[in-house]
Amino acid sequence: MTASPPDSAPNPGPGRESRRPGLARWLPLILFAGFLGLVVYGLARPDNREVASTFIGKPIPAFALPPASDERPGLDNAHFTGGKPRLLNIFASWCVPCAVEAPQLAQLTAAGAEIDGVAIRDRKDNLARFLAANGNPFARIGKDDLSKVQIGIGSSGVPETFVVDARGVIRYQHIGAIMPDDVPMILRKLKEAGQ
Amino acid sequence: MRTLGSVVAAFLALAPLAPVAAQDSMPPAPYAYRQLPDAAQEAKAQALMETLRCLKCQSQSIADSDASMAGDMRNEVRLRIAAGEQPEAIRAWLIERYGDYVSYTPQLNTLTWPLFAAPAVILVVAALLLRGRFRRGRKA
């Protein structure tokens, strides 16, 4: 029997712990590696500040908005039931990306989509100027000065576009301006909402 | 140092662009900056607003934010409190629309329960480990 020098025994405790030294020794490192992996995953994930609505699949809440423009009637929720699926565009004349998406909205109406607008905290004269400059793709435009409809459907900014089916159920939310690449996708979502 | 300088310069150059995208000229909502006449109701509303996230400026509560949407949310909260609605019902109403993210107060649900259970589980595991160790110590 050879006596081992005292410094070669890292764990001076009695027998039982040395039975399976492998796992006990590596466990902290494995846990730490797992934690590190989680941190790297969290850091590498692209930053996303968009808050998606969790109101998809639910019926649009009851509302009645006065007209935001002299050219179009106001908007209420009853307007969405019956008929065919519609787009609900949350926008404002003071919103720069809303002007960016205007040609795409025109393209959507040209393809047969019906779009209703909710103008957030907007003035009639500013809105008239905005529509004159960018075109008016809307069938109706409701004036929402307290962001009531916006909050009611879980929208957190302008512009946002919702697909609402013929039963008045919200089917899809597009956050941000509709870019030219998005047009076919929006039309497809509209079609899906009609099936 | 040069890279840091250029990053700061780029940030400063871009900063003025940000608010341009979201500036309306409407007056704030009636109860955005006005307190409720009933002090007890206002205290309830204030406590709730401090735990609701502003969706425009996501590290602020709606009580802290000057974004017009936060003002509209304060108006909504105050009117609902004034109408007799319970704060937790209003929180649930907002969570239904925006998800748990809108609430700074963590919610107990199927996704978050392990977080709440973890301390108890760790205590129990620690107690079991200690018990095993003490017994072993006595035997040795």
Image (spheres, rainbow, N blue to C red):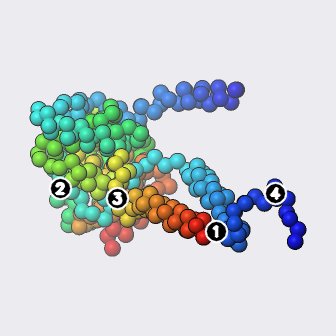
- Quadrant assignment, res B37: top left
Residue B108 is labelled as 3
Pointers 2 and 4 in contact (CB under 8 A)?
no
Q: Is residue B7 visible?
A: yes
Q: Is residue A153 visible?
A: no
- Of A90 and A116, the residue lying toward us: A90
Residue type, numbered disc 3: Leu
Where residue A42 appears, as percent x and y from the top left, is 56, 52
Dot 1 and dot 3 within a common chain: yes
Give the Cα distance between marks 2 and 4: 80 Å
Q: Element under label 2? A: loop
Residue B140 is labelled as 1
Residue A6 is labelled as 4
Task: Indicate which label's residue lies in the foreground, 2 or 3.
Answer: 3
Give the Cα distance between marks 1 and 4: 20 Å
- Of A111 and A66, the residue lying toward us: A66
Look at the image and tell me in which quarter the N terminus of chain A lies.
bottom right
Q: Element under label 4? A: helix
Give the Cα distance between marks 2 and 3: 29 Å
Residue type, numbered disc 2: Ala
Tell me which numbered mark, 1 or 3, is placed earlier along the sequence: 3
